Image: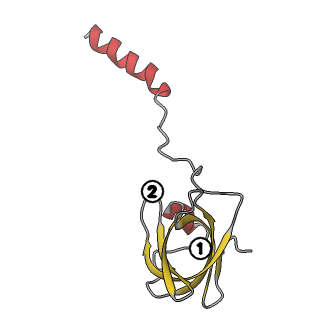
Amino acid sequence: MKMLQKIAIAVLLASPLALPASAHHSYAMFDMARTVRLDATVMQFRWQNPHAFIRIQVPVGSQREDWSIEMTSPNNLVQEGWTRTTLRQGDRIQIWVHPLRSGARGGAYAGVRKADGTVLGTVE
């Protein structure tokens, strides 16, 4: 019995040291000093953890470019006014993003203006 008590005490003393691990990645891949506005059509809005995503098509001349925009978590987006139905496939939007440093077609969400004038996030 004394051995069980010693183990219990050791576990209780060590438990404050067991801090939750943060599973967050860096935003170093995005140029956070630059913001780009894109006129786009929503192809997909994925409301998921740990990050929501918007897939968009951007017209460039007679062509279209596919972009993937990373957002924060749905929990944070709700506090900004977002819901899982804020964007739907086919919606026309203006979106502000911090582009990928690599020049690939992607970025970190900064803000959006919907066709009805609704603004979420930071738009310039």
Number of numbered discs: 2
Q: Residue at x 66, y 88 (%)?
A: 117
Q: Residue at x 35, y 19 (%)?
A: 8
Do callouts 2 and 1 mark residues in contact (Cβ within 8 Å)?
no
Q: Image height check: is 42 above or below 8?
A: below
Q: Residue furthest right?
A: 124
Residue 40 percent across, percent down from the top left: 55, 82
Q: Nearer the viewer, residue 51 or 19?
A: 51
**Helix or strand or loop: what does disc 1 sit on?**
loop
Q: Residue at x 57, y 60 (%)?
A: 100
Where is mark 1, residue-wise? 81
Q: Give the Cα separation between the discs numbered 2 and 1.
A: 18 Å
Nearest to N terminus: mark 2 or mark 1: 2
**Helix or strand or loop: what does disc 2 sit on?**
loop
Residue 53 percent across, percent down from the top left: 47, 67
Where is mark 2, residue-wise? 50
Q: Nearer the viewer, residue 36 or 17?
A: 36
Residue 101 percent across, percent down from the top left: 60, 57
Q: Nearer the viewer, mark 2 or mark 1?
A: 2
Other-residue count near label 1 (Cα within 10 Å), few / some / many at <14 / 14–19 / ≥20: few
Q: Give the amino acid at mark 1.
A: Gly
Q: Give the amino acid at mark 2.
A: Pro
